[in-house]
Image: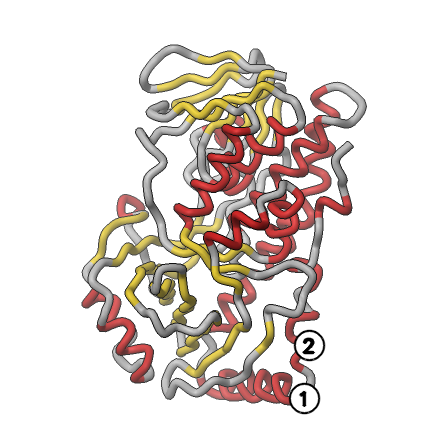
């Protein structure tokens, strides 16, 4: 098939790689003029690592990443580690790396597999009936299948749903600072109504993602540069160690967190949704990129099956739908658990501490359905 992938993010590149490896003629269209270093840190969890390993990218991923040892829930007021849960005991590694490094790795693998990457192509719409992508720069492109991997603010999603996004009542900041001594752990600094996640990146850097509850958000300010002092003021009562990290932030971006309904249908005619275009998730389980990587594998396998295109795309959505909806619900629950206050906070922290002392494996086992899932075993390549 001639397949046009809209978007050269992690989902689009993963799909392009899987589809090109399956023998399809794949073109990727990206609005940026070059795949430059954008974003910040990213966590490749075992379920995403299972796919990348099956695509023979495990060694390249290790070269670009840090293998995680543990996640450490931490009292954000006094800096006390409440518990420590191992992340290095499973079948697949849990890794920290910069998003740009993962994008570069996937882009190289996709083009080596035969996919054509075309930058400076801003997608403005698609005709799903005949399979055509339109661009702001002109010169439409025809395809047997259009894969909408154009992210959270997808232009192509509107072919399937007009459901509006709703503000969650939370805003987030992201920043990267220098920190050569950071241990290979993810720390969750929990405070009433707020939290910060920190973890190391290759090259002696530390990734920070901070989230705070607030009542409103201006849509036009979805993602923009912010004053680091505003971030520091939001966490003015943080533990000294966390406050010292925030004091070293010189550049930060802030964005509003929105909830997007998952469409009932993920495809129509010759158009199919993938990744954040289909199922945006809140950043509380490190699953946005990892679920998109799974999507790429699943779509390629669905197209290998019997039946017409409609039945193949329906099979893809039927496989992915229940899993991504469960992941989205779990992420929303984490958002609540990180921000507890008063008695509920004390009880929850005491419970975490007890689990960490008596049965730490219980903590990770409760999420085994998500992190230990290997879609390549469930749906192997033919």
Q: Which mark is residue 367?
A: none
Which picture quadrant has residue 370?
bottom right
Q: Measured along the vertical axis of the image, is residue 334 above or below residue 281?
A: below
Q: Please tell me how crowded label 2 is: few (under 14), some (14-19), or many (20+) other residues with Cα within 10 Å.
A: few
- The structure residue drawn at horizontal position 74% and vertical position 27%, both measured from the top left corner, is 304
What element does badge 1 sit on? helix
Q: Is residue 175 left or right of residue 263?
A: left
- The structure residue drawn at horizontal position 47% and vertical position 77%, both measured from the top left corner, is 340
Viewer-closest of 337 and 316: 316
Q: Is residue 259 left or right of residue 326?
A: left
Cβ–Cβ under 8 Å for marks 2 and 1: no
Q: Is residue 233 visible?
A: no
- The structure residue drawn at horizontal position 57% and vertical position 24%, both measured from the top left corner, is 271
- Please provide percent x and percent y for residue 36: 33, 39
Which picture quadrant has residue 2?
top right
Q: Is residue 189 left or right of residue 382?
A: left
Q: Please tell me how crowded label 1 is: few (under 14), some (14-19), or many (20+) other residues with Cα within 10 Å.
A: few
* C-alpha span from label 2 to label 1: 9 Å
- The structure residue drawn at horizontal position 34% and vertical position 64%, both measured from the top left corner, is 204
- Check the picture and name the quadrant holding the N terminus: top right
Q: How many marks?
A: 2
Q: Measured along the vertical axis of the image, is residue 166 above or below residue 201?
A: above
Q: Which mark is residue 361?
A: 2
- Please provide percent x and percent y for residue 112: 53, 29
Residue wearing tag 1 = 358
Q: Measured along the vertical axis of the image, is residue 291 above or below residue 146?
A: below
């Amino acid at each position: 098939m001639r397949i046009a992938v809209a978007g050269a993010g992690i989902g689009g590149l993963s799909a392009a790689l899987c589809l090109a490896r399956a023998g399809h003629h794949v073109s990727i269209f990206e609005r940026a003029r070059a795949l430059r270093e954008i974003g910040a840190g990213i966590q490749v969890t075992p379920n995403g690592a299972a796919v990348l390993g099956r695509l023979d990218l495990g060694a390249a991923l290790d070269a670009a990443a840090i293998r995680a040892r543990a996640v450490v829930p931490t009292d954000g007021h006094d800096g006390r580690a409440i518990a420590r849960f191992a992340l290095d005991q499973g079948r697949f590694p849990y890794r920290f790396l910069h998003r740009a490094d993962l994008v570069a790795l996937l882009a190289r693998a996709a083009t080596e597999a035969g996919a054509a990457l075309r930058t400076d192509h801003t997608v403005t719409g698609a005709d799903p009936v005949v399979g055509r992508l339109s661009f702001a720069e002109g010169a439409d492109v025809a395809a047997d299948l259009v894969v909408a991997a154009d992210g959270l603010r997808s232009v192509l999603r509107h072919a399937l749903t007009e459901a509006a996004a709703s503000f969650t009542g939370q805003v987030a900041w992201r920043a990267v600072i220098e920190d050569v001594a950071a241990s290979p752990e993810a720390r969750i600094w929990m405070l009433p109504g707020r939290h910060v996640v920190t973890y190391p990146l290759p090259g002696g850097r530390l990734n920070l993602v901070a989230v705070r509850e607030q009542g409103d958000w201006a849509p036009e300010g979805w993602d923009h540069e912010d004053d680091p002092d505003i971030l520091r003021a939001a966490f003015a009562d943080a533990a000294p160690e966390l406050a010292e990290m925030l004091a070293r932030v010189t550049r930060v971006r802030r964005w509003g967190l929105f909830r997007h309904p998952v469409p009932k249908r993920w495809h129509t005619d010759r158009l199919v949704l993938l990744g954040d275009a289909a199922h945006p998730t809140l950043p509380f389980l490190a699953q946005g990129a990892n679920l998109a990587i799974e999507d790429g594998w699943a779509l390629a396998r669905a197209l290998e099956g019997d039946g017409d295109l409609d039945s193949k795309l329906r099979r893809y959505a039927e496989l992915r739908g229940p899993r991504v909806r469960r992941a989205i619900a779990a992420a929303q629950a984490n958002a609540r658990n990180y921000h507890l206050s008063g008695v509920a906070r004390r009880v929850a922290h005491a419970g975490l501490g007890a689990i960490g002392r008596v049965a730490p494996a219980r903590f990770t086992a409760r999420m085994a359905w998500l992190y230990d899932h290997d879609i390549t075993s469930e749906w192997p390549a033919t």
